[in-house]
Image (cartoon, grey):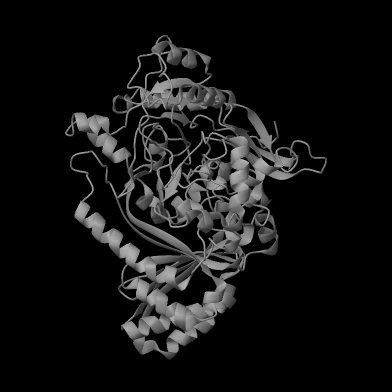
Amino acid sequence: MDKHDTRWTRRTVLKVAGALASTPAFGWIASTDTQGFTAPPTPISLGKSPPEPSDWQALKESLSGNLLEVQSPLEIYKADPSSTAAKTVMKNMKNPFFLEEQPGATHTTGWVGAFDSAVSPRAVAAENAADIAAAVTFARKYGLKLVVKGTGHDYLGRSSAPNSLLVWTHKMRDITVHDAFVPAGSRDAGIPAVTVAAGSRWLEAYDAVTNHAGRYVQGGGCTSVGACGGFILGSGFGALSKRFGTGAGSMLEAEVVTANGDVLIANEYQNPDLFWALRGGGGGTFGIVTKLTLMTHELPQTLGGFMGKIYAKSDAAYQKLIEEFIRFYPDHINNENWGETVKFTPDSTLELGLIFIDLPEQEARKIWQPFMEWLDAYSADYERDIEIVSVPFKDYWNMDFWLDNYPALIQQDPRTSAPKGQFWWKTNDSAVSEYMYGYQSRWIPLTNFHNPKALAKSFFDASRHWSFKLYVNKALAGAAPEAVERDRQTCINPAVFDAAAWVLMQASDTDIFPGVPGYEPDPVKAEALADRVAAGMAVIREATPGAGNYANEADYHEPDWQEAFWGMNYPRLLTIKKQYDPTDFFSTHHSVGSES
């Protein structure tokens, strides 16, 4: 164990789980009785005899963890909507960490015309790789559909399925920081790294790496997203990817349970083809990853925010504003110092939500000075309200710092049982118990920025249908050369290296729960908003043929998804899939091999 080890012990996790289970409002989670097992409805058995109660009991007894009977936390609301327990449930459904503590809950509750989040009747609450291997072997033997949930953040519904057996990795929370990690089979000197187990969240990883070890690991912006799972395996863009690249590019080693139940180590020296496929090939595709080791980086010194709004007083002025921003972007913002978003809205507003690192405020203002001077020259056409702030980067994930200085930016977990320091960004409230109406995205090639008039026309026309965000950080043209070099060793679509930004157009609501009276989606509203998103993104797609897309955050109905997500790498990925999973035992929506 390294000197910076900050692992969550089994005792700590069990104490928290026990506190939750002893509260009446949380009692539906599952029975933890190890003496007997009462079988709930049997999952679908694909062409094989379904397991008997005795078979389930044998699986239960073989585990270090547990075999749980699972219900949605919403069942208690359905039973008695006016009860105190029901009101507590509905309040907690707005808490991302609560959702992750429930094997029967996910962050995305459904997607119109695609799926409704479903509950697996049973879950293996895994505590180690052997538990996961046992679940895989059992599911394969009896022909059961298997799904995996770490934190349940998957937009495309891939961490739930009806009549399935769930592998729930929530209890696998070990995090170990290494001063010098050496991959198995390597004779090279070690490098600073962190190993995260399958149930870890980014907040915990950042606490270990940044708050305690003074380093940085490339991860997700949302504190409750899993640090070991679909985020990294789907390539994993974070707020600082223009500086540090993708999470997949930082991967040094993976421990993975394959379809035949084997536990393998994959890195450059052992199972290198599987290692390449795991670096961006998609979660739940080539096996179940039980832990990942990621390189860490020198900590930036400062973190800044460039925030505000620019309102155009006419359509003509708005299109002119967009064109000027597009001219400004390649030489000033498309580089390793900047990240996050610029939003284009139907009410002719440009909303700035950008961050920058290792730039003094004065330097950030100087960078934007030409753009501001342009606005001043046309002051009769625009109104603006812009603010620049800067804080020490070391406090990025320090809850006490934000509470003391910018309390409106975060939400502390209000539950008395919550671990100290557990919080989420208020801007992520919209992703908790979220129902999708429309969600489409696209990389924007750098070459499009070289024709600012044409791209501005496309952006303006798209914004007349619905608002959309341009993400600086979810593309790699303009990224730091060392980050680009690492990411070229992954299987992500090479189109990303020619893309200067990524666009997302989304319409969704929170507190929508299909099948729950009073919380059902409105089909008329859903269809109308889905149509607006489709119409807006059709304009952008037409302007960017062959641009490709980020697999983790794409349309459920993404056309030509193999080409969009992996480009020229798809044939090789398919070959590796057939090598390690010849029967397509692991199959999720729009994953490698799922077309068969």
Q: Position of residue 58 (x, y in %)?
A: 48, 12
Q: Mark yes or no: residue 123 visible.
A: yes
The image shows residue 190, relative to residue 558, as above or below, that is above
Q: Residue at x 70, y 35 (%)?
A: 3
The image shows residue 325, relative to residue 206, as above or below, that is below
Q: Position of residue 303 (x, y in %)?
A: 56, 61
Q: Residue at x 42, y 9 (%)?
A: 35
Q: Nearer the viewer, residue 315 or 278?
A: 278
Split into 4 quadrants, where in the image is the N terminus?
Answer: top right
Q: Nearer the viewer, residue 422 or 515?
A: 515
Q: Mark yes or no: residue 214 visible.
A: no
Question: How many numbered circles does the render carry?
Answer: 0
Residue lying furthest top = 35
Q: Position of residue 197 (x, y in %)?
A: 58, 35
Q: Position of residue 452 (x, y in %)?
A: 49, 81
Left or right: residue 259 versus residue 48 is right
Q: Residue at x 24, y 60 (%)?
A: 528
Residue lying furthest right = 187
Quadrant for residue 206, please give it: top right
Q: Residue at x 38, y 27 (%)?
A: 44
Q: Nearer the viewer, residue 319 or 394?
A: 319
The image shows residue 422, relative to residue 563, as above or below, that is above
Quadrant for residue 5, please give it: top right
Left or right: residue 70 versus residue 204 is left
